[in-house]
Amino acid sequence: MGAYVFDTNALLRGLTLGFAREAYTTPSVMRELKNQVTRTRLSAYISSKKLRVAKPSKRMMLRILEEAKKIGEEGKLSKTDVEVAALGLALQSQGRNPTVLTDDYSLQNLLSKIGVRFKKVGLRGIRRRMEYVFVCKNCNQVYRRYRVTCCVCGAPVLRKAIRKEELS
Ligand SMILES: [Zn+2]
């Protein structure tokens, strides 16, 4: 049976609407939901095993970070995003059929790169996959990976889209 992996916003919705399929989330998402009412509901779902909190392995986290670097999303993803993607990939590599629920564009972009299915919960999802390079504002030095400042001249580095791939 398929499983859903919830990011923070998706989980907030899930708490209201209930969980249709086996539901997973991560410890970082749990930490982001600080509201007391939410926590009470969460623990009810957890004790009835409708929601499972799973922490992906460090190896899986590192693999996600590597993939994020390749498409230039590294700087746009929070630790929670990385954890959610890593959990999705971990479930998939165990032969599960997971769908990550998220409205975060960078996370959706990453998931499409690693071949994990996602579904938006509120806003429109992405229609194409973007790839980026990073260009120094001052001297135009190009970097494949995200960095805050240029190592040649020290000026800020900006993200620039170089490729758009339509997603079916
Ligand atoms: Zn520069």
Image (cartoon, helix red, strand yellow):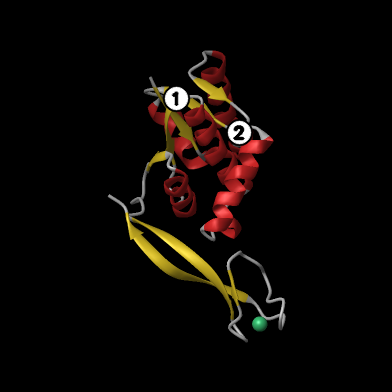
The picture quadrant for ligand 1 comes to: bottom right
Q: How many labels does the image show?
A: 2
Q: Please name the residue shown 40% across and 66% down the image.
A: 163
- Which residue occupies the extreme bottom position in the image? 139
Q: What residue lies at 48% left-to-right and 41% top-to-bottom?
A: 9
Q: Badge 1: few (under 14), some or many (20 or more) residues near its Cα, within 10 Å? A: some
Up the image or down, 59 lies above or below 129; here it is above
Splitting the image into 4 quarters, where does residue 134 fall? bottom right
Nearest the viewer among 44 and 21 is: 21
Image position of 110 with respect to 149: above or below = above
The amino acid marked with disc number 2 is Met
* Rendered image: mark on residue 5: none
Identify the residue shown where x is 43% and y is 38%: 101
Task: Identify the residue under disc 1.
Answer: 96
x%, y% of residue 19?
A: 41, 24
From the viewer's perspective, is 153 left or right of 54?
right
x and y percent of residue 93 in the render? 50, 30
Examine the image and state in which quarter residue 63 appears: top right
For badge 1, the amino acid type reads Arg
- Give how far across and how far down residue 110 sits, in percent: 48, 50
Which mark identifies residue 30? 2
